[in-house]
Image (cartoon, grey):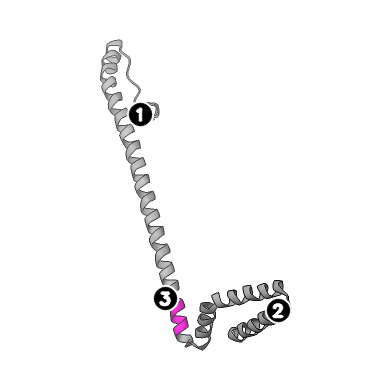
Amino acid sequence: SHRHLESVLSLLIKACGKANQPDTASECENFRVVLKDMDSTFATLRDVATADLSQVLSDVKKYALDAVAVESRELQADVQKRAKAADANVGDKFKKLESHILSELATGAADTEDVLAAGRPRPVGRSGDAQLM
């Protein structure tokens, strides 16, 4: 296991110190420190190796369910945000159209009086609507 490797590295560090090999001793010391830092990783691996597989599987399922739930909430929030933005956009367009139609109606009343006075009928139907858009 890694503990035995740490012991071997400690012995090697001492031997390198006596043999006047400081570079090799410092590399061994750095490697020993890295192994010591990874104690928690080795402990986790050891626990998993001896753990009940059904427990590991249930932990994986729980993690997957949590990850899916988080992603689902994020997607739902994004969809709601986009729906609100689209609703606001449609509302703005409707207000512009309403304003345009009301202004046309207001000026249309004066135009109608002018048209009636001139004896020409005002265009009605699709061609008149196209001019509004």
Which amino acid lies under the numbered mark 3 shown in the image of this protein? Lys
C-alpha separation, residue under disc 2 versus residue under disc 3: 50 Å
Q: Can you name the residue that lies furthest to the top here?
A: 118
Residue found 30% across the figure and 11% down from its top: 118
Which amino acid lies under the numbered mark 2 shown in the image of this protein? Cys
Question: Label 1 near label 2: C-beta < 8 Å?
Answer: no
Q: Secondary structure at mark 2?
A: helix
Circle 3 crowding by C-alpha within 10 Å: few under 14, some 14–19, many from 20 = few
- Residue picked out by circle 1: 125
Q: Which residues are magenta?
A: 55-60
In which quarter of the view is residue 37 placed? bottom right
Circle 2 crowding by C-alpha within 10 Å: few under 14, some 14–19, many from 20 = some
| Vertical position of residue 108 compared to residue 79: above or below | above
Judged left or right of residue 122, residue 21 is right
- Residue picked out by circle 3: 62
Q: Secondary structure at mark 3?
A: helix
- Residue picked out by circle 2: 16
| Vertical position of residue 105 compared to residue 10: above or below | above
Q: Position of residue 22 (x, y in %)?
A: 70, 73
| Vertical position of residue 33 compared to residue 133: above or below | below
Q: Position of residue 23 (x, y in %)?
A: 71, 71
Q: Nearer the viewer, mark 2 or mark 3?
A: 2
